[in-house]
């Protein structure tokens, strides 16, 4: 049990996919202009990552090494299709915002990378813990990042039309925060802060 907890926690702290491993950045910078969209993107990644890890771990002994990557993609694509159809049916506004980034989860470096590096070589409990940890670690970063970008880039954070937080009326939102240059600059500050946090004693075991 302790090993499973450590596997889960490392995906959030010292092996966070965005802050430490630096993978999956394209989708993160693209969809983090809206808090609402980032929440659903994070949930989608958690679901696909955990389920694909589980299936690949279960059948890893039956997957020939020569065709493992195509098999991984088939498994991942199946769960992405489920996410795509569910979002289209129940949250069409979010589906419209995320657009092409939903099907592109299939080739997201986080999903495919964990299938290759972890799920294919470990048992089911560990694979699930890894998928959940990596997914939660990704979600925490993208949600907080999107919250900050939307707040300072538009002046208010909304969730299905409800205003969660708004800045004073005198605040003039700089549009650069919602553009890619602003995203890269802000992400640099996030990266520095995160690594400083997990590098402290008791903060996650360092960044190595």
Image (cartoon, rainbow, N blue to C red):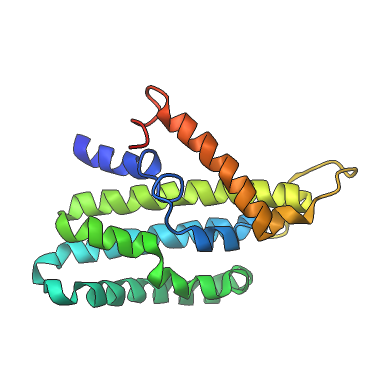
Determine whether, in the image, residue 14 is placed left or right of residue 24. Answer: left
The answer to which image quadrant residue 72 occupies is bottom left
Residue 164: in sight, yes or no? no
**Picture coordinates of residue 116 (x, y %)?**
24, 62
**Picture coordinates of residue 164 (x, y %)?**
70, 47
Residue at position x 39%, y 71% in the image: 107
Q: Residue furthest left?
A: 61
Judge whether 47 appears above or below 68 on screen.
above
Return the residue nearer the eye: 121 or 133: 121
Return the residue nearer the eye: 77 or 17: 17
The answer to which image quadrant residue 51 occupies is bottom left
Judge whether 156 appears above or below 65 on screen.
above
**Quarter of the C terminus within the rendering:** top left
Residue 67: in sight, yes or no? yes
Residue at position x 54%, y 75% in the image: 100
**Picture coordinates of residue 81 (x, y %)?**
41, 77
Determine whether, in the image, residue 120 is placed left or right of residue 176. Answer: left
């Amino acid at each position: 049990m302790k090993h499973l907890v450590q596997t889960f926690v490392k995906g959030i702290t010292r092996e966070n996919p965005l802050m430490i491993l630096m993978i999956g950045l394209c989708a993160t910078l693209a969809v983090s202009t809206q808090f609402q969209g980032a929440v659903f993107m994070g949930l989608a990644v958690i679901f696909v990552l955990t389920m694909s890890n589980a299936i690949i771990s279960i059948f890893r002994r039956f997957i020939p090494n020569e065709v493992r990557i195509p098999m991984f993609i088939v498994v991942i694509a199946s769960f992405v299709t489920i996410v795509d159809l569910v979002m289209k049916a129940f949250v069409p506004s979010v589906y419209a915002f995320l657009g092409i980034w939903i099907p592109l989860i299939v080739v997201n470096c986080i999903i495919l990378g964990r299938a290759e590096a972890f799920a294919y070589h470990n048992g089911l409990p560990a694979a699930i813990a890894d998928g959940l940890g990596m997914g939660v670690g990704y979600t925490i970063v993208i949600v907080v990042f999107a919250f900050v970008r939307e707040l300072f880039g538009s002046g208010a954070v909304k969730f299905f039309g409800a205003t969660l937080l708004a800045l004073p009326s005198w605040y003039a939102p700089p549009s650069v925060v919602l553009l890619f240059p602003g995203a890269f600059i802000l992400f640099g500050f996030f990266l520095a802060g995160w690594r400083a946090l997990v590098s402290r004693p008791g903060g996650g075991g360092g960044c190595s």
